[in-house]
Amino acid sequence: MIGKLIVTILLITAVPVAQAQNSRVSKADAEKAVTIIRGDKAKTQSYCAIGKLSKQIAQAKDKKMVDELFEKIDKLEESLGPEYVALIDGLQDIDTEKDKLGQEIISILAALDRLCTR
């Protein structure tokens, strides 16, 4: 449940830094982004920080706090690279609840979430 909340918040806050030629993302796009983030300790820490900020957004009581948290997330997302931003941007066009590809991508991203619990 929290993983879906985090992905939802990430989808909302994605910065369109990189536009894919085809707005439809692929499983390979997700695997590439995860590999890049997993292979870089600073990027992994940024990804985990986004997760923590997303949880704070879910608990925030006022709009000002939510806006501040979204700004922090935006900056961290930029540090994850254009592959990640394009992936999250492309996921906005997919119903991750009903679309098989969306579910596969969410599952691939869950590998990063597991790194955050260590």
Image (cartoon, rainbow, N blue to C red):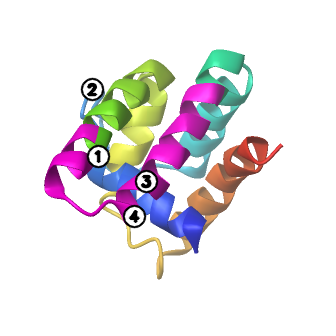
Q: Which mark is residue 13?
A: 1
Front residue of this view, candidates 73 and 59: 59
Helix, strand or loop at disc 1? helix
Residue stretch rendered in magenta on the structure: 45-68
Q: On the rendered structure, is 79 left or right of 104?
A: left
Q: Earlier in the sequence, mark 2 or mark 4?
A: 2
Residue beneath the point at 24% across and 34% down: 16
Q: On the rendered structure, is 31 left or right of 64?
A: right
- Disc 1 residue type? Thr
Helix, strand or loop at disc 4? helix
Residue beneath disc 2: 17
Asked whether the beta carbons under mark 3 and mark 4 sit within 8 Å of each other, the answer is yes
Question: How far across and down, in percent of the image, does residue 86 sit?
Answer: 38, 36
Q: Earlier in the sequence, mark 4 or mark 1?
A: 1
- Disc 3 residue type? Gln
Residue beneath disc 4: 59
Residue beneath disc 3: 56
